[in-house]
């Protein structure tokens, strides 16, 4: 009697790859814009003729505090997500809760409360960068953990990762070209709001599509 061939798993829906990868567009924008512009926003070179909100050393200290919060958040969010049970699964509730707060804190990050140099700007940058990096972890770490749970085969994993890579390239281009143009034309606060809105939309596409 011939052996019964193993059942073939159904292919992923064609829209799932673009929908899942969309959040990586916003993820790339946040990481690229934050790393490229945050120091310049708070401590530009004196010859630029822009407002200096903080000395460079204090900017570094404030961002260092944010990175400590980020490092502590990674294992906490990972364990919390792994042990979550909901009708949406383990990951999407975190993405849905974290994405709006990530967009909000990212937008606020570029709006220091004092126009000149002030310790209040230091406290603000420390708190807002910590909050932004925390909510980045809340939204992005579970999002990334979705990939192996959605993929049904090695081919599916490659396909989903390919969509992430495509969105990364587009997001990097938007971050590099778009952010600079917005800053030059309307300033850092406007740039933060526009990029935050784009980021939120990209995550909503993933939340709805997945």
Image: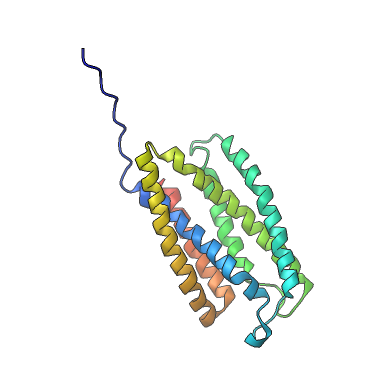
The C terminus lies in quadrant? top left
How many marks do you count on the picture?
0
Residue 46 horizontal side relative to residue 158, left or right: right
Where's residue 11, x and y in %?
A: 30, 38
Picture layout, residue 139 above or below residue 43: above
Where's residue 95, x and y in %?
A: 52, 48
Residue 180 horizontal side relative to residue 151, left or right: right
**The furthest residue to the left:** 1
Which quarter of the picture shows residue 170? Answer: bottom left
Residue 92 seen in the figure: no
Residue 178 horizontal side relative to residue 162, left or right: right
Q: Residue at x 21, y 16 (%)?
A: 2
Q: Residue at x 71, y 69 (%)?
A: 59
Where's residue 172, x and y in %?
A: 46, 65
Q: Residue at x 33, y 49 (%)?
A: 15
**The furthest residue to the top:** 1
Q: Residue at x 50, y 47 (%)?
A: 144
Picture layout, residue 183 above or below residue 94: below
**The furthest residue to the right:** 119
């Amino acid at each position: 009697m011939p052996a019964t061939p193993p059942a073939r798993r159904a292919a992923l829906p064609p829209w799932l790859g673009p929908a899942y990868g969309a959040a990586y567009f916003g993820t790339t924008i946040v990481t690229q814009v934050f790393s490229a512009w945050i120091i310049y926003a708070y401590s530009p070179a004196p010859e630029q003729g822009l407002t200096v909100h903080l000395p460079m050393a204090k900017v570094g200290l404030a961002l260092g505090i944010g990175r400590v919060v980020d490092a502590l958040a990674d294992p906490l969010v990972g364990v919390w997500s792994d042990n979550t049970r909901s009708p949406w699964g383990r990951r999407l509730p975190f993405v849905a809760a974290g994405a709006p707060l990530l967009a909000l804190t990212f937008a606020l990050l570029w709006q220091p409360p004092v126009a000149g140099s002030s310790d209040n700007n230091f406290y603000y940058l420390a708190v807002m960068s910590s909050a932004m990096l925390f909510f980045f972890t809340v939204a992005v770490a579970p999002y990334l953990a979705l990939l192996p749970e959605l993929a049904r085969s090695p081919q599916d994993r490659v396909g989903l990762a390919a969509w992430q890579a495509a969105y990364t390239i587009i997001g990097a281009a938007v971050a590099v070209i778009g952010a600079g143009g917005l800053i030059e034309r309307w300033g850092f606060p406007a740039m933060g709001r526009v990029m935050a809105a784009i980021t939120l939309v990209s995550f909503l596409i993933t939340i709805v599509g997945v």
